Image (cartoon, grey):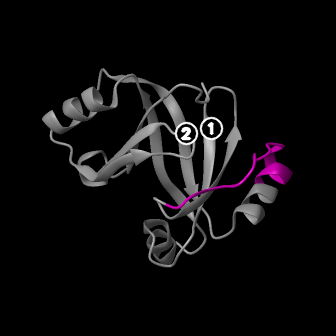
Amino acid sequence: MSEVTGLSHVAIAVPDIATAATALERKFGIKAGPVHENTAQGVRLAYIDLGNARIELISPLSPDSPVAKFLEKNPAGGLHHVCFNVGDLDAALAVAIGAGARQAGKSGNNVHGDRIAFLNPREVLGVLVELEEKGVGSRE
C-alpha cells in the first residue's frame, strides 16, 4: 500500500492494563501513559511511546466488545493488531480494498480524534490492521 507513511503502534490486548504496564516497566523500563476510554470501540487503552512508534495496551470496557472476545480465546492476552499511519484514510482504504482487502466494521475516530479504519485479517496475512490518519493536534 503506497499510502502507508509509517508504523503508528502495535496493540496488545491484556486482561488488566495496570498489571501489564507494571510488567513492561519492570522488564524493559518503559512506562505507559494515562489510561483512556474509547466507548465507541468498547476499549480502555494506554500508550507506551517508544519515539518511533507506540505500544498500545488495550482491555475491554464490556464483555461483548471485540477485545473481550479476543481475550476469551487468549486469556493471557496477545498481539491484537498493528496500526499504520496513512496520509489519506479514504485513499488508503481504496487501495487496500482494490487489492482484495475487506474493511472490518465502520470507520471511526480514536481517542485522539484521528480517523481510523480496520482491515479484516483474512486478507492481510492473518493480522488485524488498523489504518490511522492523523488529524490536527494529534500525536506525531
Q: Label 2, on which residue? A: 9
Report, in whole angstroms, how far the alpha carbon at label 1 lies from the one at label 2: 4 Å
Left or right, 57 with reference to 96: right
> Which corner quadrant holds the C terminus?
top right
Q: Position of residue 60 (x, y in %)?
A: 55, 68
Please state if 136 lies on the left or on the right of 120 as rendered. right
Q: Is residue 56 magenta?
A: no
Determine whether 51 is above or below 29 in the image: above
Q: Measuring 75% from the left and 45% from the top, which residue is drawn there?
A: 33
Range of magenta residues? 24-39
Q: Earlier in the sequence, mark 1 or mark 2?
A: 2
Label 2 SS: strand
Q: Position of residue 124 (x, y in %)?
A: 29, 45
The percent coordinates of residue 6 (x first, y second) are 48, 25
Name the residue that disc number 1 marks.
54
Horizontal side, residue 105 vs residue 66: left or right: left
The answer to which of 134 and 49 lies nearer the viewer is 134
Residue drawn at 30 percent across, 52 percent down: 106
Q: Tell me which amino acid carries mark 2.
A: His
Magenta stretch encompasses residue 36: yes
